[in-house]
Amino acid sequence: MQFNSYIFILCFLPLSLILYFLFHDLGKRKLAYGSLLVMSLWFYGYFNPYYLAIICSSIIVNFLLSRAMATKGSEEGSANVRKKVCLIAGLLFNIGLIFYFKYYDFFIENINAVFRTGFNLKHIVLPLGISFFTFQQISFIVDSYRGETGDYSFLEYALFVSYFPQLVAGPIVLHSELIPQFRDEKKHRVNFDNLCRGIMLFTRGLGKKMLIADMFGRAVDFGFSQAALIPVGEGALTRPEIIIVMLSYTFQIYFDFSGYSDMATGLGAMFNLDIPMNFNSPYKAISIADFWKRWHMTLTRFLTNYVYIPLGGNRKGKVRTYINTFIVFLVSGIWHGANWTFILWGVFHGFFQCINKLTHEGYVRACDSVKKGPLGRVLAAVIKAVSWTLTFGIINVLWLLFRADSVSQWIQILKRLFVLNLDVRSELVETFRIPRFRYVLSFLRLPSEDLNVLLTGCGIAMAAALIVCLCCKNNYEREYKTNALSLAFTWVLLVVCIVSMSSISTFLYFNF
């Protein structure tokens, strides 16, 4: 089920809230948990009930393994052996689950290509959110091995894994962040401040997705459809078209993922539950390392705590630190999808992260050395601006790789940047049309042909999106006041979004 759908907003969400708080008011905590679990499973299996068998099996197996680790043995040595066996079994089960559903066909395709074999592909349907709920359970299995999990009931554990706001696109939540909140009796009654804040967050996230991300997405879809149909020669993407498509995807994925994160946080607030921050204005980053502290923060946390640190982190010398960093980003690329584009995207991010580690100390010293006096502050600002420009440029080019159908398509698109052709098709920029804007241009005595109107609208949309990304507080940093103006804006925006739901567009991270 999609957050941006009639059935979710008008039926599923109100029913979930009513049942959850009604059962708590009646003193039926297990029924409250059970109702939220059933609703979460309905949310997950709405489009394909087959998904329910996968997630339920995964929950049962991981819970039994965690309980086996917690069982006290007669001898300490045998208990440790059992825990290690359960840990290995849990890791193999979860990684195997992701491999089968997400990477099996990709693996077979490459085996066939390299060895010229003819193994059949299974064309397996990728279950929604399998990467997210599987990583969440890997963290639980590892924490169980370390003895860091509590005495959770099966109902609490199942709800922790399947809780619908974070189920299919994150954040990747830890048991210590969510289950204690389920148990907190102070959170079992309707809190109207949290409810209002949640509705405001949810509505703003919905607006980001439907009114901004989907607008840029239409330009991206047209651009890549042309790149697939006509990769070279006459009719292929031109230099300005590539720049428009690249920037459009940069803003599409930003507002799409930011919108989902806001909606997930808002939904959590409605249930009096704090969802961890997952998105912190990443385009303000002045380095790739800074970008990954801001983008998909819970994935970065997972990879740091459960991959980087177990590999040795930065405790075994510089060379090992760079190797460990590179491995983490390779895993991140593989996690995002079964395509060489994602793997290469992770490799490039790992490479630039290592470059950042090599140059970070020099960068800090350079900034500190020039900060003295007015001229020094100007030079420090220039250094920071250059760092931001380089980082933003790298992110844009790598997002183009992330979106491309293949590595060869990405390379072909980059090659087209060196072909001098400044034409722009009106179909590409049609999504940026501003009604009646032709008359404004005519009044200002500016060219008012239809293509100029569309290009001007495109430029305004790009500039506005960049200003929002760089200058505005994100929705986690804002204070939500329940005054008349704020509430009126929220309800008007919600009505506009609901009226605009002519078709349901999938969140980009649902594909991962």
Image (cartoon, helix red, strand yellow):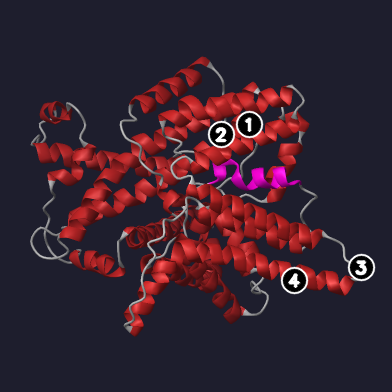
Q: Residue at x 8, y 61 (%)?
A: 234
Q: Place residue 213 in its image quadrant.
A: top left
Mark earlier in primary sequence (4, 2): 4
Q: Marks 3 and 4, how far apart in space?
A: 16 Å
Q: Is residue 413 left or right of residue 204?
A: left
* Few, some or many residues within 10 Å of mark 1 (<14, 14–19, 20+): many
Q: Which range of residues does the magenta coloring cover? A: 153-167
Q: Marks 1 and 2, how far apart in space?
A: 7 Å
Is residue 158 shown in magenta?
Answer: yes
Give the residue pinned by disc 4.
Answer: 84
Q: Place residue 71 in its image quadrant.
A: bottom right
Q: Main secondary structure of the magenta part?
A: helix
Give the residue pinned by disc 3.
Answer: 74
Q: Residue at x 19, y 43 (%)?
A: 429
What is the x, y in percent for residue 469? 42, 44
Q: Nearer the viewer, mark 3 or mark 4?
A: 3
What is the x, y in percent for residue 500? 33, 28
Circle 1/circle 2 CB separation < 8 Å: yes
Q: Residue at x 21, y 54 (%)?
A: 225
Q: Marks 4 and 2, how far apart in space?
A: 37 Å
Q: How many marks?
A: 4
Give the residue pinned by disc 1.
Answer: 271
Mark earlier in primary sequence (1, 4): 4
The three-letter code of the residue at mark 4 reads Lys
Does 319 appear above or below 508?
below
Does 173 appear above or below 417?
above
Judging depth in this view, the residue of 370 and 275 nearest the camera is 275
Does 316 appear above or below 452?
below
Mark earlier in primary sequence (3, 4): 3
Element under label 1?
loop
Circle 4/circle 2 CB separation < 8 Å: no
Q: Is residue 70 left or right of residue 99?
A: right
